Every structure is written in structure tokens, then in C-alpha cells.
Image (tube, rainbow, N blue to C red):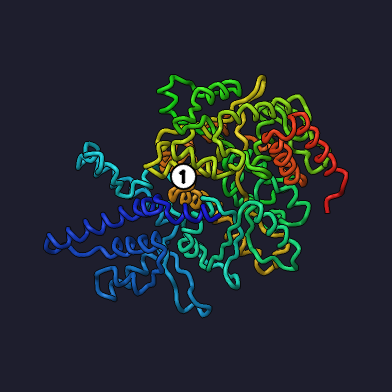
Amino acid sequence: MNAMRGYSQSNPAAPHAQGEMLDMVAFLEDVSDETEGAIDLVASNPHLRMALHLLKGHFEAKVITPTSLIGASRVPYATANRRLKEMIEAGLIEQRPRTKTNKSYSMHPSEKLMAQWVQLSGRVRRLAESRLGLKDAPDDTQDYYFGGSYTAAQSIPPLPVCTEPLKIPGGLRVLVHGDPTFMVMENLKRQFEQVIGTEINQRAFSIDRLREEALRNAERTASRYDILAVDLPWIGEFAERGVLMPLEQAMDIARLDPADFHTAGWKATHWGGRAYGVPAQTTPELLFYRRDIFARAGLQPPATTDALLQTARTLHDPQRGVAGIAWNAARGTALGHTVLMTMADFGQPVLDLPEKAGGFDTDALAQHSYRPTIDTDAGLRAAEFLLELLDYSPSDILSMSWYERVRPYAEGKVAMAYGYTLLAPYFELDDTSPAHGQTGYLPHPVGPGASPVAPIGGYAMGIPANLTEDRIAAAVEALTVFTSPGAQKLYVQNGSRTNPRYSVAADPDVRRASPIFEAVDGMSWRDELQFWPRPPVPQIADIIQICGEEFHDMLRGIISPRDALQNAQGRADALFETTLT
């Protein structure tokens, strides 16, 4: 978590994203100043001046009052007051009470004004390009957008404010994972507080501590949190142990536009046919590879496990400080995830799930009609594959977990790495990284007869089952805002490389931000994004831990692959002999 905090605080994308939105405002203000100052009888346009002041305040998360709007108009008070009322009546301005007496208001751009802003940004940019020849300008000036972040017709507009501030004593309380996406939310705290109209208190933990705190919170009489971030494999356990509330109990799920979420990500939030969370980040584990290194070596991106081993062998050069590949091999949770995903690469889930077109059927998991399948032929092939991979990995591979595997890749010390897309900012946003602009993204290479798979990871956001009644409505509104297309786009513009929605992946500004989004979108359409490699059953966290311990002993040479499989199978079977408490 500390590493993530360091990353988020130095995130170079945040000022750039905010600058794109503010450039257009500054440009039109400057044009207005020059026009009014250069030509006699040209008067200030109070509607435009107030609109620009309002938009600037919204993008900078500053409170705008009627008095400050009138002051920005540059016309006499009475005239400005009339023009302000006209804008309110036209539906361009939202007024939000600042006090319980409703005598004081803050002013915010409405969705109507936001939509008009999108159109204006695009028109001005196109006019500047066509009339001033900016398309032929030097490279360093072509990047000056004039608000170009919101130019295309299909662009998602800036996030609007809630008409009414959320009424929730003490502010909104959120428990999250300490990863880059949630740290982006923390960096945008002021802006989200302005949007929902109340203070946000966010606590961030590492993955294991997050699960412990969520389970501990469920034992309390009343939840300490209004919203919980939940790792997707925990959904079944959290549903059955009463950690999460079924969404249908708290809200109209249609408000979320479920069809807009990547299918695998949305289905992964369900248990027994009911949704228990909203996808906050869909982050598949992919194979990152250095396109420039591959080109120099005359290599093709590997599509199979055999090709991956051969490629890693070719590129592994420890004498020059370069390893072939990095992956999750640290004991426990980290390696356990790798084991489950590697078994999936050889065409088998960790449970005896029924096969169906495109993978395995997870719809009946809540019926508990499944058993562990670890000690199998596919399990043995997976174990032997990991042992071979060990030979072409960094010397400290057995202590590498989520972030440690991507750091050496970003530093140019590794030619390939398995990694979640949420970790791509380590090299995508650092122009000093050798991997910057040189990374390709692939689904997992697979064994003989298996289909390509990109195992889904990431987090959903849900409502605690023990949240007091008086806080549920506000929690629902905040949850809807945090997972909306506008919020997801904002996360991307400020450095996140995860996204659960088709509409956000299609946004031209998002696609410009990183090739990841187009790659993942294509994998979703090809049905390669799957969550069956880590089925969200109540026992999954223990199964992952068991595999992470037994296979670690195998990689250290303490036990053989067959012993590791037998031990893991026996321990996993024992889990099903006890009733979930």
C-alpha cells in the first residue's frame, strides 16, 4: 500500500488531465479579453463569462457562489443578476443548498451545460485546426488541445454534480484496496466531494488486510463503512457470510446500465443470480512484452506456453542483467493466484465446473455442487510449466508479488511479465521507462488444446449488509457516481488503466490514453475475458492460500510436483468437509 501511495502522489497524469479540461476555458477567456480590449464598443458577454467561470470552478473542484458568478460577468450587478436568472431558468445551472435553511446555494454546471460544452470544445478545436493551420504546427504545439479531451460526439462529458448534496452524518466512509485506481480516487477526493456534496473518508489496505477488515466489519452491529471494495473472487464468500447486501435490496439496478459493463466483470459480481456489487475496475491479467526487444530478436509474440518458454529462454540474459519473464511467485496469496491462472492456461479450472462454449459454467456455484480439481493431468502440466519458467526468471522471483513483478519490467530488467492492467501506469506514465511506449498486451499463452484466456481481476464496490437504514440511500447515490461512465473516464485521465465499461473503452480520449483499452475491449468481444479461473466460491481464498504454500515448496525444491499436487488436493478437499461459518 505504501508503494501505491508513493505512485499516486507522484502521478504525472493528473495535472495533464486537468489541464486539458481547463485549456479551453482559459482560451475562450483570453479571446474574450483580447476582443473586448482591442475593439471599442465590444461589451462583455455575461452569459459566456459566467459559464466559463462556472466550468472552471467545477473542473478545479472549487465552490462557486452566486456572488462570484455575478463578479465574473463583468457587467453591472443588476444586469448580471438578470442574466444569472436566465441561465438558471434555461437549465444551465444547478443550485445546491449549502445550509439546512436553503438560504445559501452553491452553483454548478448542469448536464445540459456540460453537453453544450462538449460540442463547443469540439467546434473550437476544429476551427482552430482548419483556420489557423494548427494541424501543421510543430509537434510540441500539436498536443495543445484547446479542450480536445471532449471533442468527439461520442465523448463522455465531464462528471456532473448531484442536484442535492448527500445527507449522511459524518460524511461518506469508504473501504478500498491500496491500488493505483483507488489511489486515483483519493487524489480526486475534492472533486468527488464537490460532486456528491459531502466529505469522503477513504481507508486503503493491502489485499489480505482488506479482506480481514471487511469480515471484521460484518461482525459489527452497524457497519463502519458505507461502501466496500471487494476483490471479485470474494463475492461468493461475502454473499453467504452476510458481508454484502444484494444490490436489488437497496436500489433499482437498471440505473447502473448493466449492459454497459464488460460481460465477465458484471457476471463476476453475482452469486445465486443476485448482484452484490458494481464493477469498479475490470483488470485482466495479461502478458506484457517489450515490442522493441522482440523486433530486434526477430521474435513473434507467444501464443502458446511452449512458445512462451522458448521466447523466455531466448531473451534470458542474466549476465547483462535481463531476465526472460517475471510473475507472481511469492509464497501464499500471490503464487496461489498464479497457480489457478496457470491451470486455466492448460484448460482446467480449480473446481470441477461443467464445460460450456467459451469456457466453464459458473451460474450454479451457489448450489455448492463442486469439488476441487488440483491433482490432475492439467495440474501436473501447470506445475511443470512453472518449474521451467523458474529457469528464465529473476533470481528473486520467489519473493515477487503484485508490484514486484512489474517494477523490473518497467526498469528494463525483464523482457516479459504477467501483470494486471492496473499496474501498467508504472511504465505507461513514466517516459523514462524503457517499456514506455514499447509494450504489447496479450491474453495468457495457452497449453495444447486450450483457448486463449485473460483472467479477470479487479474490484467491485458494494454496500455492507449491516449498513444502517438511514445511510443506505446516500451510499447508493455515491456508488452510482463512483462507477458511472463519467467517473471511470476521469480515473483513466488521471492515470488509471482499468475500466469495466464498454462505453468508456469506446471513448476516443480513453483510447488515446493507452492501447490497453482497445486491447482489453477486443478480448472481451472475443470472449477471452473470463472469471472462471478464480471462481468466486466461499472457499476460494483458502484454496488460493493452499496452492500458494504447496507450490512454493515445490518451486524451492522441497517437494516434487506430484507431492505438491497431492498435498494441495488433500488440503482443499478438507475445506469441503466443514460447513462455512
Image-based side of 511 in relation to 567, left or right: left
Q: Residues within 10 Å of mark 1 (few under 14, many from 20)?
A: many
Q: Quadrant of residue 418?
A: top right
Image-based side of 510 in relation to 76, left or right: right
Front one among 88 and 327: 327
Q: Quadrant of residue 138?
A: top left
Q: Residue at x 82, y 41 (%)?
A: 368
Image spot of residue 455 (x, y percent): 62, 36
Q: How many marks?
A: 1
The amino acid type found where label 1 is placed reads Pro
Residue highlighted by disc 1: 425
Front one among 99 and 393: 393
190 lies above or below 287: below
474 lies above or below 389: below
Image spot of residue 544 (x, y percent): 71, 42
Image-based side of 402 in relation to 55, left or right: right
